[in-house]
Image (cartoon, helix red, strand yellow):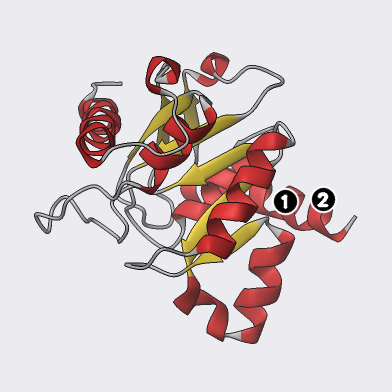
Amino acid sequence: MIRKIVIALLRIFNLLVFRVKKIGEENISKEGPYIMCANHRSNWDPPILVASTKRLNYIMAKEELFKNNFIKWFAKKCCVFPVKRGKKDLESIKFSLKVLKEGNILTIFPEGTRNGMEKNGKAQNGAAFLALKTGVPVIPVGIQGKMKPFHKVILNYGKPLDYSEFKTTKPEKEILDKVSKDIMDNIIMLTEEKI
């Protein structure tokens, strides 16, 4: 109940403050698991994506955010869960697999940090690993806009990417890198698309 109230308030906030506009929402079917991958512009990305998705959407976020008790409480109500960056976080992986097994949406920011690609960073392999291990489709999302109050934010949802032909319990690094790059290339294309 608390989660529904928080999400409802976030939806109102999204409309009034960020004027969120959604493109390609029909690419998300009403059921079945998906791994949603978006570019990372600001700390507002997780709540904007949670409130903009009609289905239950769990979002992976850096564990540093959970040091503040209020943010920790708020995050849990919004289905945001922690991940240890730069490490093999088994607890986070197990939780992610559970989310997908239950048929929900799991959102990951492959850049691993805000504006990671602008900092010449390399896309992280977490999303690719989960996609290859489970065979679950990936939905790329391009977040456009200034991410400032009263400026329009556009969520551009792409068509699902199917990597099930490469499904394996132990993906090789070469394949992981290839799939990670493909996911990020699709996200970048959606961020640059004229709306």
Q: Is residue 80 visible?
A: yes
Image point (70%, 19%), residue name: 30
Estimate the x, y position of residue 127 in percent, counting from the top left: 41, 42
Q: Residue furthest bottom?
A: 68
What amino acid does circle 1 point to?
Answer: Ile
Crowd band around label 1 with a 10 angstrom C-alpha radius: few (<14), some (14–19), many (20+): many
Determine whether the residue tagged by mark 2 lies in a helix, strand or loop.
helix
- Residue at image mark 1: 7
Image point (64%, 76%), residue name: 72
Q: Residue furthest left?
A: 120
**Residue closer to the observer: 158 or 6:** 158
Which image quadrant: the C terminus?
Answer: top left
Q: Is residue 16 visible?
A: no
Residue 127 is tagged as none
**Residue closer to the observer: 124 or 29:** 124
Please determine whether, in this image, residue 5 is positioned above or below residue 36: below
Estimate the x, y position of residue 98 in percent, counting from the top left: 68, 45
- Residue at image mark 2: 4
What amino acid does circle 2 point to?
Answer: Lys
**CA separation, marks 1 and 2?**
5 Å
**Relative horizontal placement of residue 105, taking residue 24 as reference (left or right):** right
Determine whether the residue tagged by mark 1 lies in a helix, strand or loop.
helix
Q: Are marks 1 and 2 in contact (CB under 8 Å)?
A: yes
